[in-house]
Amino acid sequence: MGHHLHLDTGKDSRLRFPAPLTVLASGEQLDALKTAKGAPWIENANLVQLELDQELAESHFRGDGILVVEVDPTIPASMERITQVRTRSPDRPLIVALASADVALVRTLVRQGVSDVVALPLQPEELLQAAIAVGEVRARQDEGRVDLAPLIAVTRGLGGGGATTLVTHLAAALAERVGSERVCILDLDLQFGRVSEVLGLQPRRTLADLLDANARVDGALLRSVAAVHSSGVSVVAAPHDIVPLEAVDADQLARIIDLVRREYDFVLVDLPSNLTHWNLSVLAEASSIVMVVEQSIASLRQARRRLDLFRSVGIDRRIVSVVVNRMQRRLFGTISLGDVEEALGHTVVTGLPAEDQHIGIAQDQGQLVSDVRAKSAYAADVGKLADILQRQFEEGRQLRNGNSRSGNRSTPVSMKRRRTSCRLPLPTRHRTRPTMPISTAILR
């Protein structure tokens, strides 16, 4: 895990855990920690004064060691620190320090990805024990870590935008390229998920079985839950019953996603349109984010808001691929792809043609559009998108191997910061603009 901080506890042995240990706390707490007796290791820790009403800054997210953050449940702004850290640095061990916590609050913190909780005022011995325990757990996780498959998150700003249709066809296109039964879709749209429905599958088990399995989730259970489509794509279906989005155990979901990424070559997730802490974490972990938009003011407004949110939580915009669904090329009365790019301040990777009639017929039969229309332009363009993503992942894998990054999450980490030069050709004609600029309209 990189550098380590050696802690002299006064005993014969020297304890160690990932360095640097960073403590973000109020001046009062830090002063007490600095003056504590019998804790010389404090001198090697990174102590940063941050009052409870102060916001986290960019510098606070730097580093990969254990992070200790003071919070107060009565000050909502301080509690937001947990979400910010988990979103910006999802793999970083996080210890929360607070004055008092009941069982319900501790459970909530654990579900949000907190590694441990310590009491205030900060006591060196308790902090040391918590840090060592967290470091040991992380070391065991690193020893057992294997290469993880690329994670492609498909998201949309509005329902009915064609995200589920895209995720199913993109998965089938990837399966055709890497071999059947090596691609899996996780339907995380817990309330309105339709992946299994549009593929004509009737699974007996769903994602709910994996969420309920807790630590017992393993490859055998995953295979019993996943239903296989004729294209070779495996599907972990959304629960049969509507599940409140906030009821999801974020840690359990993370375990499930890691398991699926170890079992398959490509993993795609169909996310709900509503944003929560856990699906923001999924987006932050994604190797690639495919955002589906349409040529409408409402869709573009929501897409712009999402891009702004991604930037605010530290998601690299270079991993976001904007795809325009049901693309219209009429001369008048439409928003051009150029308008979309200008309004979003983001490149459009491709536009997908409107084939609603043929897609509807195919989905009614549990098939893909290429099964009912051999020369489907929609399927062809999705195939090109699959080629772009596959090439992007391969470039990332080569970079990782060249740098010999042992111990890191392989494909996602290596390709996450790479900008792909691939882009499907977009039509440049028909750029007639409406009276009000689209970029102005979506911001009104």
Image (cartoon, grey):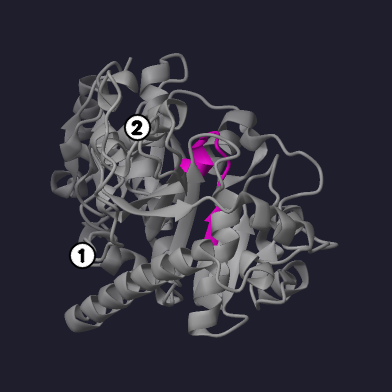
Mark 2: few/some/many CA within 10 Å (<14, 14-19, 20+):
many
Task: Specify the amino acid type for callout 1.
Answer: Ser
- Residue at 26% over, 76% down: 395
- Residue at 36% over, 30% down: 81
Give residue 311's position: percent from left, percent from top. Answer: 28, 38
Viewer-proximal residue among 28 and 204: 204
Residue 398 sits above or below residue 43 on the image: below
Task: Specify the amino acid type for callout 2.
Answer: Arg
Give residue 4's position: percent from left, percent from top. Answer: 22, 63
Q: Find disc 2 in the rendering and name its residue.
A: 304
Going by the picture, which residue comes out furthest to the bottom? 179
Residue 321: image tag = none
Q: Quadrant of the N terminus?
A: bottom left
SS label for mark 2: helix
Q: Quadrant of the C terminus?
A: top left
- In-image side of 18 versus 201 (left or right): left
Residue 340 sits above or below residue 426 on the image: above
Residue 398 sits above or below residue 138 on the image: below
- In-image side of 237 versus 126 (left or right): right
Viewer-proximal residue among 112 and 117: 112
- Residue at 70% over, 50% down: 194
Q: Is residue 330 magenta?
A: no
Residue 421: image tag = 1
Quick check: marks 2 and 1 in contact, CB under 8 Å? no
Mark 1: few/some/many CA within 10 Å (<14, 14-19, 20+):
few
Disc 2 from disc 1: Cα separation: 22 Å
Q: Is residue 278 magenta?
A: yes
Give residue 261's position: percent from left, percent from top. Answer: 52, 70
Per the rendered image, the range of residues in magenta is: 268-280
Residue 437 sits above or below residue 153 on the image: above
In which image quadrant can residue 126 be found? top left
